Amino acid sequence: MAEFKNEDLTSEDAFWVMFYFLQEHYELSENTFDVSDILSASEPMDWNGTGIKRPADSGMIDFWNDAIEKYRKQGKPDWKKLKK
């Protein structure tokens, strides 16, 4: 079973990890992103009565860990250039 990485993140680090996490879901959905899908899959559940909260879809842990790894390797995303 997937486990969360034990990472110390500042609030800014966590924000950019969240950006990468959401971006991955947006790209996987072929740009038809629905936040309710992520919220449903991330809903805290207690599957085996231990009181340990885990996402309804344990694959969400892998997506989160991947986003942490991407942030650690790439840092903050590139600036988006606005066009006039």
Image (cartoon, helix red, strand yellow):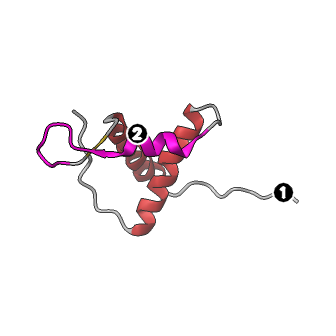
Report, in whole angstroms, how far the alpha carbon at label 2 lies from the one at label 1. Answer: 36 Å
> Which amino acid is tagged 2?
Ala
Q: Are marks 2 and 1 in contact (CB under 8 Å)?
A: no
Residue at the spot x=38%, y=44% of the render?
42
Q: Residues within 10 Å of mark 2 (few under 14, many from 20)?
A: some
Q: What are the residue bounds of the magenta stretch?
A: 33-52
Residue 33: image x %, image y %?
60, 40
Q: Nearer the viewer, residue 20 or 73?
A: 20
Looking at the image, the residue that sits furthest to the bottom is 11
Q: Residues within 10 Å of mark 1 (few under 14, many from 20)?
A: few
84, above or below 47, in the image: below
Residue at the spot x=48%, y=58% of the render?
16
Residue 50 figure quarter = top left
Residue 70: image x %, image y %?
44, 46
Any mark on residue 83, and which? 1
Left/right of residue 24 with respect to residue 82 in the rendered view: left
Residue 15 lies in magenta, yes or no?
no
Any mark on residue 41, and which? 2
Residue at the spot x=43%, y=49% of the render?
73
Q: Nearer the viewer, residue 9 or 53?
A: 53
26, above or below 16, in the image: above
Residue at the spot x=28%, y=62% of the render?
8
Q: Nearer the viewer, residue 47 or 27?
A: 47
Residue 47 lies in magenta, yes or no?
yes
Quarter of the image that includes the C terminus: bottom right
Looking at the image, the residue that sits furthest to the right is 84
> Which amino acid is tagged 1?
Lys
SS for dot 1? loop
SS for dot 2? helix
Residue 14: image x %, image y %?
41, 60
